[in-house]
Image (cartoon, rainbow, N blue to C red):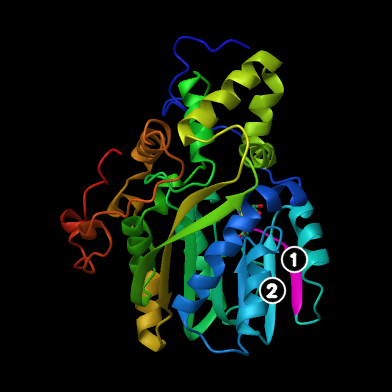
Amino acid sequence: MSPSNNATAPWPAEAPAPPPFVFDDGAAYELMIGRWSALVAQPFLDWLALPHGLAWLDDGCGDGSFTQSLVLHRHPASVVGVDPAPAQLNFARQRVATASVRFMEGDAQALPLPDASVDAAVMALVLFFLPDPPQGVRELVRVVKAGGTIAAYHWDLAGGGFPLQPILDAVHAEGYRSQPPPSAWTATLQASEHLWQNAGLSDVQTRQFEVSRAFESFDEYWRTAHGSPRLRELFATLSSTAMQRLRACARERIGSAEDGPLVLKAKANGVKGVKRWGAAIRQGLASLETPLSHLPFPRDTDRAAADHGACFSSPRQAPIATALPRRHRRRAAPRRGAASSHPSPPPAF
Ligand SMILES: C[S@@+](CC[C@H](N)C(=O)[O-])C[C@H]1O[C@@H](n2cnc3c(N)ncnc32)[C@H](O)[C@@H]1O
């Protein structure tokens, strides 16, 4: 397939919504992202600083990467992992075969759990896949007990923090399109903080995590991309010549030799907050009705903004090491009803 002239944009805002991402291969997912997620999980759990022996929800548990870290580092009384993808759940069940852990098929926007049934809930690399992220957060608030913690981390997509960003950059440089996750706009520190505050959570904090992963060779890294449902679809349409060119482009962007080990970096943005007690909960639930336009990146424009960040951002360097400017790391809580005080979208990268 030769790229069309106007195909340099990754996914035009005016195009019809693409089909949802389907994670249909747990083993391939583990090589592609599961191992990266585990690298974030440990410092993220340290940051949450929650005691051992709690009842947890791992929402969008995927292949059980975060679940396993949770079991190893927080010795939970119980964990429920929820995910809509049977292939991921099969992998997770084999990986974390412990009586205190159970995995269920389900949707983060309509969790198959009773109200106030867990002490803590985490979404690891999931929020940006939800068509309706505020509904996903609302569900977390519903199932966590008052005083419990609700937390998430997501790749810093706009900051070039996605582990496969150099390959995506090569895809775009070669004139192909790639589809960003439907709610990529949630992945910034500011958007996460606003979502958590609008959900009525208290003690909201955000933090960025930078991790490094070693590969034996560029080829090992390149092969992980075949675990991406979207990239796999694209690769299947390319001739071997086009594939070789794409691979060479990605390798060049990283600045890697054909042989020899390499270390790549990725960045994840974390957010945490505490479910309030009593009247504050009702108030918080009411604030969940806040229209999306009150969030920093209105839904109409989020895809375009995310596209811009994801496509043309990265210099000739794999997942970026540069931290966000301090002014983007934390924001004061917005005054109720003061929509105009919300921060403006992040700069184009
Ligand atoms: C990038 S993976 C993250 C998996 C795991 N939490 C980790 O840290 O590796 C994203 C996961 O979100 C799941 N997912 C997508 N849509 C979802 C939804 N509506 N509700 C719950 N999970 C969803 C996918 O099936 C996939 O397993």
* Residue beneath disc 1: 104
Q: Residues within 10 Å of mark 2 (few under 14, many from 20)?
A: some
- Which region of the structure is painted magenta? 101-109
Gap between marks 2 and 1 measured at Cα = 7 Å
281 or 25: nearer the viewer: 25
Left or right: residue 322 versus residue 240 is: left
Q: What secondary structure is found at the residue carrying circle 2?
A: strand
Does 275 appear above or below 156? below
Q: Residue at x 45, y 45 (%)?
A: 319
Residue 23 drawn at (x, y percent): 69, 46
Q: Do we see residue 109 in this rendering?
A: no
Residue 257 drawn at (x, y percent): 55, 34
- Circle number at residue 80: 2
Image quarter (top left, top right, bottom left or bottom right) of the N terminus: top right
Tell whether label 1 touches label 2 (CB within 8 Å).
yes
Q: How many marks?
A: 2
What kind of residue is marked 1? Met
Residue 243 figure quarter: top right
